[in-house]
Image (cartoon, rainbow, N blue to C red):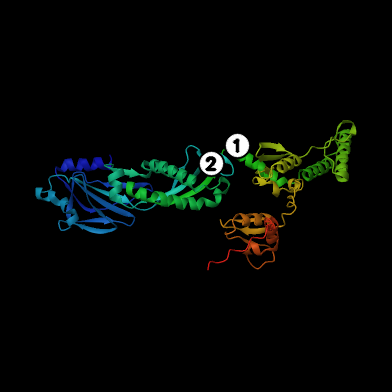
Amino acid sequence: MSFWNSVKKTAVEHGKAQFLDIIEWLDETRDTIVFRFPVFNQAIQDGGKLVVREGQAAVFVSEGKLSDVFGPGTYELSTRTKAIAGFFESIKYALNYPYKGDVYFVNTRQFTDQKWGTPNPIMMHDKEIGPVRIRAFGNYAYKVTDPAVFIREIVGTSGLFTTSEINGQLKRKLVSGFADTLGESEIPVLRLAAAYMDLGDAMRERLSKWFEDSYGITLTDFVVENVSLPPEVEKMLDKRSSMGLLGDMGKYTQFQTAEAIGKMAERPGGGNAFMDAGMGLAMGHVMGGAVAGGAAPGMAPGGAPPPPPGPALLHYHGPSGQAQLSAQDIAQRVAADRSGAHNVWAPGWPGWKAWREVPEIANLVPPPAAAPPPPPGAGAPVHYTGPDGAQLQIPAGEVAARVAADPGGRHLVWKAGMSGWIPAKDLPEVAQALAAAAPPPPPPPAAGPTPPPPPPADE
């Protein structure tokens, strides 16, 4: 017979309410959050005790309305206690009626090691890899910090409430918040391992206030244990790492061949001697060729050397589009359009490089054509500033033309070796150009007949 049925049977058999001297709760589980103390058909004795231990809170509900919340401590239950005076209204009826209220004990300790994970992959855009799907998992911890809100919003009238009844909702909220936080952080996937703690701290700051206001609980810890990529992406990353570890493929091939010869020499004598001799001669020929001239491991039929390898191709991206080209072809495109953006990439590089950063291309690009000399008579360029304030580097002849076009304007010039700007007219080259461009004076008037003397004055 359950405890509740036992209480009901006792109340029916005695025909009146039973007295409760001490109200307390000892939790023997690790997942109970709320426990409703059995007060069915019972009365709280005036002068009884309420014992609330550390990590607990007691919530009294009188006739369906929350009455008060008690923290850790021992309290006297009597009509002199204002917060619980309503509990003793049944005394005036000689305790013949059951108490119309509930006493809830709330576990306020931390509930740790609660698991979370992404049920479906999260789609995100990585700066280095591009669009990628990831999965993540970890654990979190929380505790009830506002028992009144928790009972009002989550528990309701349930007599027993455990972590399993709320963890599902918490996980869904945490996964949604984690996806938003990860997307806003813009951390590259390959560098996430160094940001697990930062992501956990950001999640606590982001969701703690919402949990407190909505559920009455506080998110005390959030741990990201692992972020993983799809298996096919992980395989590609493993291949890329292996290529970086191998380094020089020629040396790696020679090493593998040398190991094969050593293993063949250790084989027992029961093998095929002719086959062993043939394999040994073939490997020896390959090794000898590699040491003498660096020949490739493969040989053409008949002992002839294989055809020379073609030029290595690089990935190219420029004004004309993207293609795989040799260094010579890329150099020709750069020379034809020096103002364009020409970038190249090869396996093993972390990213695209400008053509100037690749020696095998930069050495093939011819230098730009030299600027033509100034026209005869124009003179060497000088620094000039005119009435409009613009600064130019133009020949002295052009400066003289500007001065002649606006004689009243402010024309200044400067060239290397001068201590400061001077009027353009004071520069010898400009003065000479101005003098050469000035129109010649008009010819003097021709000699005419001598005018007659003036008439005498009247007397």
Q: Give residue 15's quadrant in the image.
A: top left
> Which residue extends farthest front?
459
Q: Is residue 221 left or right of residue 217?
A: right
Residue closest to the eye, 331 or 150 = 331
Q: Which residue is identified by label 1?
A: 232
Q: Residues within 10 Å of mark 2 (few under 14, many from 20)?
A: some
Kindly give the residue lying farthest to the top in the view shown.
Answer: 301
Near mark 1 (Cα within 10 A), the count class, few <14, some 14-19 or many ≥20, is: few
Tell me residue 177's x, y (percent).
Answer: 43, 45
The amino acid marked with disc number 2 is His
Q: Amino acid at mark 1?
A: Glu
Res 131 seen here: yes
Secondary-structure class at tag 1: helix
- Residue at the spot of label 2: 125
Tell me which residue sits at (35%, 47%) in the image.
Answer: 32
How many numbered discs sit on the rendered protein? 2
